[in-house]
């Protein structure tokens, strides 16, 4: 007896959904409290590198001194802190909402 084709194969939409969402949870747990500030800090690092390269091109003989390196470290730290605070301000109400939603009988 031949079974229906739909019983054996997935539809195109199900295949795409499984590809992007996946059938199992990821085994890597990335915290948004670290990931988002790290992205902002990485962008500030790239901006600092580009600015230093432009300054070397336009002002011949500019060298990286200890004072500039210190400012770069301070800017990266401040950027990470600002990214963390912004993330916390955004995610705290969402976390509170999820906790309240889990208490309801709907879920």
Image (cartoon, helix red, strand yellow):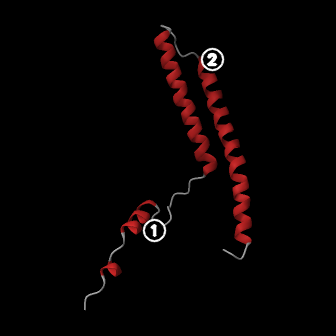
Q: Where is residue 17 in the image (x, y as percent from the top left)?
A: 44, 64
Of all residues shown, which one is farthest toward the bottom?
1
Residue positioned 51% across, 57% down in the render? 28
Q: Residue 67 carries which label?
A: 2
Q: Where is residue 92 in the image (x, y as percent from the top left)?
A: 72, 53
**Label 2's element?**
helix
Q: Which mark is residue 4?
A: none
Q: Position of residue 59 (x, y in %)?
A: 50, 8
Residue positioned 44% across, 60% down in the render? 20
Of all residues shown, which one is farthest toward the left?
1
66 above or below 34?
A: above
Nearer-the-camera pick, 21 or 27: 21
Q: Which of marks 1 and 2 is nearer the N terminus?
A: 1
Q: Residue 23 carries which label?
A: 1
**Total count of labels:** 2
As measured in the structure, the alpha-carbon distance from the residue carrying label 1 to the one carrying label 2 is 52 Å
The crowd level at tag 1 (other Cα within 10 Å; few <14, some 14-19, many 20+) is: few
Judge from the rendering whether residue 62 lies leftward or rightward of residue 19; answer left or right.
Answer: right
Residue positioned 74% across, 66% down in the render? 100
96 above or below 70?
A: below
72 above or below 84?
A: above
**Label 1's element?**
loop
The C terminus is located in which quarter?
Answer: bottom right
């Amino acid at each position: 007896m031949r079974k229906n084709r739909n019983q054996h194969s997935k539809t195109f939409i199900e295949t795409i959904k499984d590809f992007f969402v996946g059938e199992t949870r990821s085994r890597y747990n990335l915290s948004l409290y670290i990931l988002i500030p790290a992205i902002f800090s990485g962008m500030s690092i790239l901006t600092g590198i580009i600015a230093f390269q432009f300054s070397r091109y336009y002002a011949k003989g500019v060298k990286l001194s200890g004072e500039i390196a210190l400012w770069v470290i301070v800017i990266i730290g401040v950027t990470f802190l600002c990214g963390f605070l912004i993330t916390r301000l955004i995610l705290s109400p969402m976390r509170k909402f999820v906790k309240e939603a889990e208490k309801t009988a709907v879920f």
